Amino acid sequence: MDSRGERTSVRVTIYNQPYTLGVAGEPGEVEALAHTVDNLMMSIAQRAGNVDATKVAVLASLQLADQVRGLEQELEQLRDLKQRVDAKSREFAVLLDGALE
């Protein structure tokens, strides 16, 4: 979200609690994120049984943090792969230049 633009108020509901958020970007994006968090928390609550909202929120946070860590690891692997591909491309370019001379 871009903090430089005008802010718009967006009302969302997460785990049966209404929130009004100031959004600088696209309100629909925040609504979609809130919907995702709401679905995750509802799913956790159904599986966990009789636990309070704070525990559900902590479990949801842990699950989201695990997903972020997995994506960060995957991104790092892709960066490594890109570096290897770039190095091979340079090698092939040198070989091609040599063959064309």
Image (cartoon, rainbow, N blue to C red):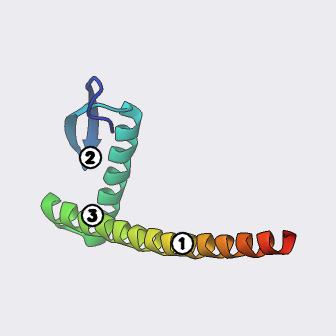
Q: If the image is split into quadrants, where does the N terminus sit?
A: top left
Examine the rendered structure and indicate whether residue 49 appears above or below residue 53: below
Q: Which residue is mark 1?
A: 83
Q: Which residue is mark 3?
A: 60
Which of the 4 quarters of the picture holds residue 69? bottom left
- In the rendered structure, are the residues bearing label 3 and label 1 in contact, judged by CB atoms less than 8 Å apart? no
Looking at the picture, how far across and down is residue 57, in whole percent?
20, 60
- Count residues near mark 2 (Cα–Cα under 10 Å), then give few for <14, some for 14-19, many for 20+: some
Q: Considering only order in the chain, which callout, 2 or 3, is on the residue closer to the N terminus? A: 2
Name the front one of labels 2 and 1: 1
Which of the 4 quarters of the picture holds residue 70? bottom left
Q: Considering only order in the chain, which callout, 1 or 3, is on the residue closer to the N terminus? A: 3
Q: Which residue is mark 2?
A: 14
**Residue type, numbered disc 1:** Gln
On screen, residue 38 versus residue 99, left or right, reads left
In space, the residues marked 2 and 1 are separated at their CA atoms by 41 Å
- Label 3 sits on a secondary structure element that is helix
Q: Nearer the viewer, residue 1 or 94?
A: 94
- Label 1 sits on a secondary structure element that is helix
In space, the residues marked 3 and 1 are separated at their CA atoms by 35 Å
**Residue type, numbered disc 3:** Ala
Q: Considering only order in the chain, which callout, 1 or 2, is on the residue closer to the N terminus? A: 2
Q: How many marks?
A: 3
Looking at the picture, how far across and down is residue 49, in whole percent?
24, 69
